[in-house]
Amino acid sequence: MARYKLYCVGASGNSYKVALYLNCAGLDWEPVGVDFAGGETRQNNWRSSINGMGEVPVLEVDGRRLSQSGAILNWLGETTGKFAPVNSDERFEAMRWILFDNHRFTANFATHRLLFSLLPDAPHPQVLSFFRARVETAFSIVDKHLADRDFMLSERPTIADFSLAGYVFYPAEETGFDLATAYPAIEAWRSRLARLPGWKPPYDLMPVGISLNAKRKNHL
Ligand SMILES: N[C@@H](CCC(=O)N[C@@H](CS)C(=O)NCC(=O)O)C(=O)O
């Protein structure tokens, strides 16, 4: 049995942040599928036994169950030393970008993707354009930041990169954004990440769980 067990689902970019870290760090891990579309994370027994916040990812290790991808990445960095910030300035900078990722970069991109391609019903166009504008703002900020550096903190990848990478490898037809054309620095950064040993795209790394994607296909 693997030391690290990740409760996740292929369509969850928040899960992918941790899955990608574990794989690139060369850690002994395995994905545990969750029936997300079937509402497993909303059931009382899942919340009382796996994660009271009702979300994936959850990392099970040494008898503990850890949630929140940013906190998990921070903990993994501290406990394994892999992709860890190395001093207080870097720790501050990693936390700053992980928080920005959680409330601006991932949050808006993931919500836009959900509305754009994963939910059974088409959203109101104004709702979609609201999220599209918020994605464009957040992505422009990160694109500018990456224009003169290889990775978010420096010339080497850290936990901050894994956090921001959560949703950028899902296909354009799913996200509704052609990142390659619109954000050249993000595109170059994405290519650098994809060359890291252990890198795999989301559905290859987490071929588990029943995703919203599958649910939508059932509706079509
Ligand atoms: N900030 C959290 C976000 C986690 C999150 O939103 N997970 C989604 C799947 S990607 C989820 O489980 N949502 C529960 C729900 O919609 O009921 C993290 O980074 O771990």
Image (tube, rainbow, N blue to C red):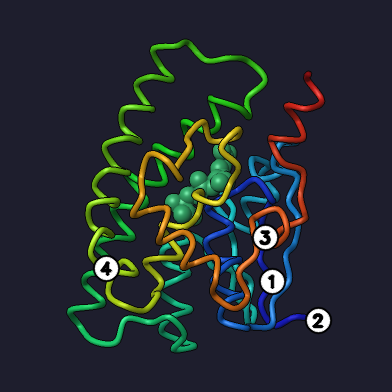
Hey, which quadrant is residue 37 in on the image?
top right
**Alpha carbon distance from label 1 to label 3:** 7 Å
Question: Which residue does the image show at 48% across and 69% down from the upper left?
Answer: 72
Q: Are marks 3 and 4 in contact (CB under 8 Å)?
A: no
For residue 54, say whether it is visible: no
Residue 12 at what x, y percent from top left?
60, 48
Numbered label tally:
4
Q: Give the labeled residue for mark 3.
A: 7
**Alpha carbon distance from label 2 to label 3:** 14 Å
Front position among marks 4 and 1: 4
Residue 203 is tagged as none
Q: Amino acid at mark 1?
A: Lys
Question: Which residue does the image show at 63% across and 75% down from the upper left?
Answer: 198
For residue 154, say whether it is visible: yes
Classify mark 1: helix, strand or loop. strand
Q: Are marks 1 and 2 in contact (CB under 8 Å)?
A: yes
Residue 5 is tagged as 1
How dense is the environment of label 2, judged by Cα within 10 Å: few (below 14), some, or many (20 and up)? Answer: few
Q: Give the labeled residue for mark 2.
A: 1
Front position among marks 3 and 4: 4
Q: Give the labeled residue for mark 4.
A: 149
Q: Earlier in the sequence, mark 4 or mark 2?
A: 2
Q: Earlier in the sequence, mark 3 or mark 4?
A: 3
Q: Quadrant of the C terminus?
A: top right
Question: Which residue does the image show at 81% across and 81% down from the upper left?
Answer: 1
How dense is the environment of label 3, judged by Cα within 10 Å: few (below 14), some, or many (20 and up)? Answer: many
Classify mark 3: helix, strand or loop. strand
Left or right: 72 as drawn, with respect to 199: left
Q: Are marks 1 and 3 in contact (CB under 8 Å)?
A: yes
Residue 132 vertical position relative to residue 94 in the rendered view, above or below: above
Question: Which residue does the image show at 37% across and 51% down from the upper left?
Answer: 102
Q: Are marks 2 and 3 in contact (CB under 8 Å)?
A: no
